[in-house]
Image: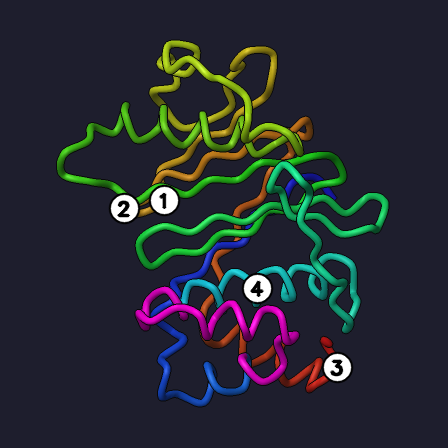
Amino acid sequence: MGTIVYLIDCSIFELSGSLYSRCYRICPEDRRCKIDRYSEAKDKQLSLAVYMLFAFGIYDIYGSRFVPEICIHKGGKPYIGVNGICFNFSHSGSCSACGFSELDIGVDIEQGKEDMSQREIRCKGCMEAYGKQSADGYAERLDEEDFAHVLWDGWHDCIGKNIFSKAVGNYILSVCTVNKDISIIKIDETHMHDYLAKVGDSIR
């Protein structure tokens, strides 16, 4: 299957809209509780969007209507107890991302900022993706200089790991994984409605 990264603009999940309501209802209880803890509408949308990308990917790649329970490694990385299914989340601004691969993967999405150059944003994203690729990666001490050469779209070697960097609109996507056969798929409201029509209320 290679590496597949799904992206979505969370603004399609308007809190008063039917898409948000239906997606919220089919989320597992722990995800609904997490969404409810947020006070800002944008944070609720991002949390819902990243879970729905995960559910969409499980169906789109593996053909399963049922979404496995997401567990959290002691290092902070989400995982499921299914061999051959590795994934990782990220969100920034109004964009959520979820990547899948057969082997460990780290994903980061960074929104462009006026006070940061594209070089700085790429460097930050690559460091995040590198750290998230392994279960204990969050605790690693990284040096920005090891990622400073990532200046263009494509694959790069950073401290012995493959990192893919790509500008996507006003965002920089960074992916750290072994499999360099990568696809980036943008999901919109139509995709999500079609998915819901196929799976109904069976994803939990």
Image quarter of the C terminus = bottom right
Determine the CA span between mark 1 and mark 3: 32 Å
Disc on res. 202: 3
Question: Residue reaching furthest right?
Answer: 83
Q: Is residue 34 above or below residue 184?
A: below
Determine the CA span between mark 4 and mark 1: 21 Å
Span shown in magenta:
24-44
Kind of residue at badge 3: Ser
Badge 3 marks a residue whose secondary structure is loop
Determine the CA span between mark 4 and mark 2: 22 Å
Q: In percent of the image, x 40 and y 32: which residue is there?
A: 125
Kind of residue at badge 1: Val
- Give the main secondary structure, helix, strand or loop, of the magenta stretch: helix
- Residue 21 drawn at (x, y percent): 48, 86
Sort mark 2 into few (<14), some (14-19) or many (20+) by Cα contacts within 10 Å: few
Sort mark 4 into few (<14), some (14-19) or many (20+) by Cα contacts within 10 Å: many
Disc on res. 51: 4
The residue pinned by badge 2 equals 170
Disc 4, disc 1: CB below 8 Å?
Answer: no
Q: Tell which tag, 1 or 3, sits nearer the viewer.
A: 3
The residue pinned by badge 1 equals 168
Residue 83 lies in what quarter of the image? top right
Q: Is residue 187 above or below residue 85?
A: below
Q: Earlier in the sequence, mark 4 or mark 2?
A: 4
Disc 2, disc 1: CB below 8 Å?
Answer: no
- Residue 116 drawn at (x, y percent): 19, 31
Q: In percent of the image, x 58 and y 36: which residue is there?
A: 106
Badge 2 marks a residue whose secondary structure is loop
Disc 4, disc 2: CB below 8 Å?
Answer: no
Q: Tell which tag, 4 or 1, sits nearer the viewer.
A: 4
Kind of residue at badge 2: Asn
